[in-house]
Structures are given as structure tokens and as C-alpha cells.
């Protein structure tokens, strides 16, 4: 048994080493290709400044920081502005009217080499220092974020995502409402699904288990909603949590792109979810919401959202301070839903 475990351990180590070697080779090839592309681009734009906005991940961070593109456009009306982003999140910036394009970032280390070339005339980097690639030795540093003392240990203590990340980029603190830019073809795709009008949309799982609420509570909540109101309920996200079978319940988990998810949320009469990318979509789409928060690491009293949700407009934030989201009392969520939806319509 011990020898078998050692074999599997050694195999995992060698697989990681192989993946690391391939990744680093591909990274340097990618740097060369992108630098060549950017040099050609600079020649094409004929003296206009080449401006980079850098925030490559996550879904909620990119949506929250959408107003940065508008602010940078005001500062560089003649600039050629591109957003550096990971491929998985590119559609969030692809259709922004104040951007001239985007550049897919392979990893933070690749970004370091591109910035060292000096190919960009102006850079607005919203990343906090020391978010490294798991394969690369280089340590990304943002001197502007360091200068204002912004770290992963304190950023939620100091304000919402947009407020702090805009300062990390060297901009004044921005407080504008985020917006989603959804093209017509996405809306037509959602039309083709023939979804019910004005649903309640729920999102139950985040990328971090510490943000989640128990599956039993979600199933109980959906059962109560279906028994109490005539409104359809739709679950969105990557993986389903609700197991109820009911003609008025539908799961779209794993079936939608990011922008399609945003469009479904935009059409909802109410969004109920944990702190995650779809919650930021609801904020940006002017959808009334109920957001379930809880202690995250050392962050107890925090609010990630700017704009409408920060102002408290059509939003209920539930947080049992000092307790994780998993311990949020069930009846708090039910009561908040009843306040949003009105008196029960079924006996």
C-alpha cells in the first residue's frame, strides 16, 4: 500500500513538472506573438496612445470595475484602449463601447514580460501585488497598489471592489454604477429558450465554498417559493444545487455563457444569491436582489458592490456578522423574499 501511494505521489509530481515545463515554453512563445502583434498595432494607430487596462479575472471583479473603462476613455479620448483579460472572461469586455479591443492574458507572468517591453504608452493595472501563476517563478507587483498599502489581507476593509481597484490603477476612487454590455445576438439566444416571464432567478454556488449557503436551505427556499407564489424559479450557475422537480422550476446550470447568464438575470423580477459573479450581474443589470453574505477570512463587515447595491436601492443584504454564510438563518432569507414579493398568494 505504501509503495502504491508513493507511486501515485511521484506520478503527480512528474505530471506537474511536465505541465510546468510546457506552460513556461508556451508562455514565452505567447509573449513573442503578442509583442509582435502590439508593435504592428502601434504602427497602425499612427501615433495614438496605446492604453492597457489590466484586470484579468474574476467575473465579479471585472463586472464591478466596468466603470474604469469609461473613466479611461474620458482621459484618453483618442487612445487605442485594450483590456487584458483571461480567456474565460473575455466576453465580459468584448462588447464594451469604450474599448477598442481586448488581449487574452495567458498568465500573470506573461503580463510581467509584456509590461517590461514598454509597448504600452499608458497602463492602468488594477491587480493587487503577488497574485502569482502556479507554474511561473515571477512575482507580479503593482507599485501603485503597494504605495497605497492595498493587499489581499485588507482590501475589503477599505471599500468595495471598484472603489479600491480603481485606486490600485492610479485613478481617483470611482463610485459609478457598473453596467453590462449585452449584444443583440445574446438576447436573441435567450429569446429562443422561451423562458417564462419575470422569473425569480437564484444562484447557489460560488467558486469559493466559504461563500455558499447549504443546499438543504436552497431546496427548502425554492419549495416554499413555489408553494407560496405563482412565479417561476430558475437556477443559474455552473452546477445545480436544487433537486426539486416542479413544472414552475427550471435549471439552466451549465447551459449558459456569461453574457447569457447576465441576460437571464436582467429579465428576472428578483435575484437571490450568494456573493459571486452573478450577484454583480444583478447589480449591473438593475435587478432587485437578495444577497447572502457571511464572514470571509478576516472580513466581517464588508460590501463588494458599488453603485445601486451600495446605495441600498432594491437590494437586501443579509449578513449575520461574525458568522459564515453557511450559518445564515434560513428564516432571514424567507422573510426577505416575502418583503420583496409581497404577501403570499397561495393559501
Image: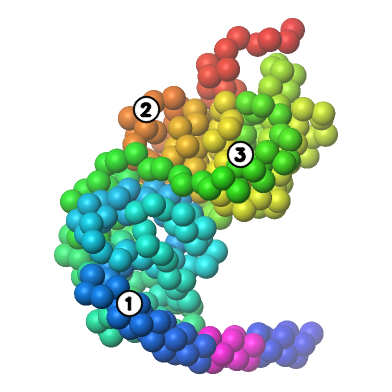
Camera-near label (2 vs 1) is 1
Image quarter of the C terminus = top right
Q: Is residue 42 above or below residue 328?
A: below
**Distance of mark 2 from mark 3, alpha carbons?**
22 Å
Q: Residues within 10 Å of mark 3 (few under 14, many from 20)?
A: many
Residue furthest to the top in view is 347
User: Which residue: 40% across, 82% down?
Assistant: 37
Camera-near label (3 vs 1) is 1
Relative to the observer, which residue lies in front, 26 or 317? 26
Is residue 22 one of those drawn in magenta?
yes
User: Which residue: 57% across, 26% down?
Assistant: 269
Nearest to N terminus: mark 2 or mark 3: 3
Contact check, label 2 and label 3, Cβ < 8 Å: no
Image quarter of the N terminus = bottom right
Residue range (magenta)? 14-24
**Distance of mark 3 from mark 1, alpha carbons?**
39 Å
Query: Which residue is label 2 attached to?
Result: 312
- Can you see residue 160? yes
Relative to the observer, which residue lies in front, 241 or 38? 38
Is residue 29 one of those drawn in magenta?
no
Callout 1: helix, strand or loop?
helix
Nearest to N terminus: mark 3 or mark 1: 1
Magenta segment main secondary structure: helix
Camera-near label (2 vs 3) is 3
Q: Is residue 165 above or below residue 322?
A: below
Amino acid at each position: 500500500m505504501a509503495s502504491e501511494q508513493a507511486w501515485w505521489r511521484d506520478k503527480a509530481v512528474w505530471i506537474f513538472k511536465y505541465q510546468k515545463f510546457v506552460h513556461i515554453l508556451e508562455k514565452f512563445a505567447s509573449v513573442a506573438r503578442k509583442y509582435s502583434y502590439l508593435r504592428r498595432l502601434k504602427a497602425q494607430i499612427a501615433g495614438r496612445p496605446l492604453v492597457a487596462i489590466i484586470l484579468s479575472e474574476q467575473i465579479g471583479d471585472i463586472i464591478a470595475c466596468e466603470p474604469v473603462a469609461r473613466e479611461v476613455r474620458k482621459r484618453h479620448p483618442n487612445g487605442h484602449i485594450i483590456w487584458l483579460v483571461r480567456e474565460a472572461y473575455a466576453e465580459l469586455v468584448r462588447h464594451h463601447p469604450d474599448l477598442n479591443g481586448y488581449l487574452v492574458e495567458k498568465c500573470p507572468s506573461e503580463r510581467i514580460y509584456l509590461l517590461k517591453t514598454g509597448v504600452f504608452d499608458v497602463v492602468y493595472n488594477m491587480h493587487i501585488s503577488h497574485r502569482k501563476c502556479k507554474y511561473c517563478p515571477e512575482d507580479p507587483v503593482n507599485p501603485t497598489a503597494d504605495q497605497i498599502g492595498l493587499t489581499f489581507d485588507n482590501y475589503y476593509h477599505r471599500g468595495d471592489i471598484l472603489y479600491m481597484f480603481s485606486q490600485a490603477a492610479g485613478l481617483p476612487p470611482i463610485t459609478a454604477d457598473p453596467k453590462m454590455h449585452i449584444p443583440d445576438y445574446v438576447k436573441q439566444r435567450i429569446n429562443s429558450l422561451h423562458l417564462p416571464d419575470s422569473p425569480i432567478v437564484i444562484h447557489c454556488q460560488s467558486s469559493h465554498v466559504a461563500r455558499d449557503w447549504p443546499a438543504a436551505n436552497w431546496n427548502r427556499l425554492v419549495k416554499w417559493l413555489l408553494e407560496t407564489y405563482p412565479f417561476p424559479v430558475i437556477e443559474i450557475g455552473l452546477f445545480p444545487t436544487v433537486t426539486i422537480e416542479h413544472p414552475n422550476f427550471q435549471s439552466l446550470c451549465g447551459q449558459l455563457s456569461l453574457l447569457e447568464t447576465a441576460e437571464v438575470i436582467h429579465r428576472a423580477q428578483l435575484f437571490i444569491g450568494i456573493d459571486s459573479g452573478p450577484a454583480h450581474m444583478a447589480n449591473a443589470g438593475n435587478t432587485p436582489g437578495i444577497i447572502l453574505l457571511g464572514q470571509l477570512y478576516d472580513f466581517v463587515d464588508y460590501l463588494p458592490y458599488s453603485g445601486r447595491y451600495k446605495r441600498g436601492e432594491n437590494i437586501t443584504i443579509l449578513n449575520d456578522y461574525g458568522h459564515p454564510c453557511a450559518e445564515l438563518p434560513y428564516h432571514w432569507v424567507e422573510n426577505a423574499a416575502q418583503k420583496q414579493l409581497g404577501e403570499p398568494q397561495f393559501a
